[in-house]
Amino acid sequence: MPPRKKVREAIFHNLGLKSGSVLLSLLLWAFVIGQEVYEVKYRVPVIIHGVPEHLAVVDQSVAALTISVLGQPRVVRLLSPQDFDVNLHLDSSATPGETIFEIPPDRVRVPNGVRVIGVSPSRLNVKLEEIVERQIPVHPRVVGRPAVGYRLGPVTATPNTVTVRGAASVLTTVDTINTESIDIANAESGFQQRLPLLLHVSNITSIDPSVVNVEIGIEEETAERIFTGVAVACMGPIKAGNVVNAACEPSRVDVRVTGLYSAVQQLRADAVHVVADASKATAEIGSRIQIAPVVSGLPADLVGVVPAPATITVSLMPPD
């Protein structure tokens, strides 16, 4: 028999039986795969339910449990920590102190098709404390700098204390409660703003009131400015009905002006005058007398002085 014919007979001999065997193998493989299960571990946060209003959880031995589950791949792959419910519930008779929860696998609720085979740790220690109430001072939190020439003035909060409720051990560590930041960058005048209170600690149950009114004071600073080379106006006395000529030495001086920042900055140099007034002098012509210079022409809220010399030498000369 030719070789090719032998190959064909080998292939097609009992073809039905061979096809059935292949089909049975495929079905068996699908069944085995369908029955395969995976073990997967999930980290599930611990949530304590039913905490009485007069108590707070201040400590617990772990923040999350490791839960091991078995299930078909198509099921366990879709799970998330939110699909687990660990039934940890306090009753109304709970008292301050330590409470212990035993957590066997059957205490964990999971979706259908999944079985819990382990919880680690299987015991949870929880510490409870009494809720207390304290009056805490308010601290307005100010950031930034006012405009040039201005400074931060008084800052007040109304009310300046608030009632805070929370775990006793927590409140003993709280000295003040901050407001949300208030920015005074480039401010030139005071203002008011309502701000929420912020307390970044755990186990605080309430803050009353939670919003306060803050008044920010912005004050103008005192500034100084030097005007150089200001001419000295000499005033001689009147003798026999004639004005005596007077010459000053030095004839020009520097003037230091102080006052509120805005007024000092707005002052023009030609508004600053210095006078050596010898009009009431009784000295004879030809005399040299010492006169304290006087700064004039300034607004009432500004002060001008001649830092040096302290006196001007005025020479009295015959009238023209």
Image (spheres, grey):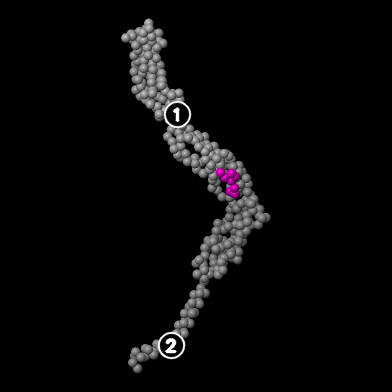
> Looking at the picture, how far across and down is residue 118, in whole percent?
56, 65
Estimate the spatial distance between the alpha carbons at disc 1 and disc 2, rounded to whole Å: 111 Å
Rendered view: 192 above or below 81: above
Q: Is residue 76 magenta?
A: no
Residue carrying label 1: 260
- Residue placed at 63% from the left, 46% from the top? 132
Secondary structure beneath dot 1 equals: strand
User: Where's the N terminus, which quadrant?
Assistant: bottom left
Residue carrying label 2: 15
Mark 1 nearby-residue class (10 Å; few <14, some 14–19, many ≥20):
some
On screen, residue 234 versus residue 125, left or right, reads: left
Magenta: main secondary structure: strand
Judge depth for marks 1 and 2 and give the one in front. 1
Q: Which mark is residue 112?
A: none
Q: Amino acid at mark 1?
A: Leu
On screen, residue 4 versus residue 260, left or right, reads: left
Quick check: marks 1 and 2 in contact, CB under 8 Å?
Answer: no
> Looking at the picture, how far across and down is residue 90, in whole percent?
64, 57
> Looking at the picture, how far across and down is residue 23, in whole percent?
46, 82
Residue 313 seen from this side: no
Q: Is residue 207 magenta?
A: yes
> Looking at the picture, how far across and down is residue 175, in whole percent?
56, 42
In this view, which residue lies farthest toward the right? 93
- Residue placed at 37% from the left, 12% from the top? 236
Q: Amino acid at mark 2?
A: Leu
Q: Observer-nearest residue: 103 or 78?
A: 78
User: Where's the C terminus, which quadrant?
Assistant: top left
- Residue placed at 45% from the left, 23% from the top? 300
Q: Which residues are magenta?
A: 204-211
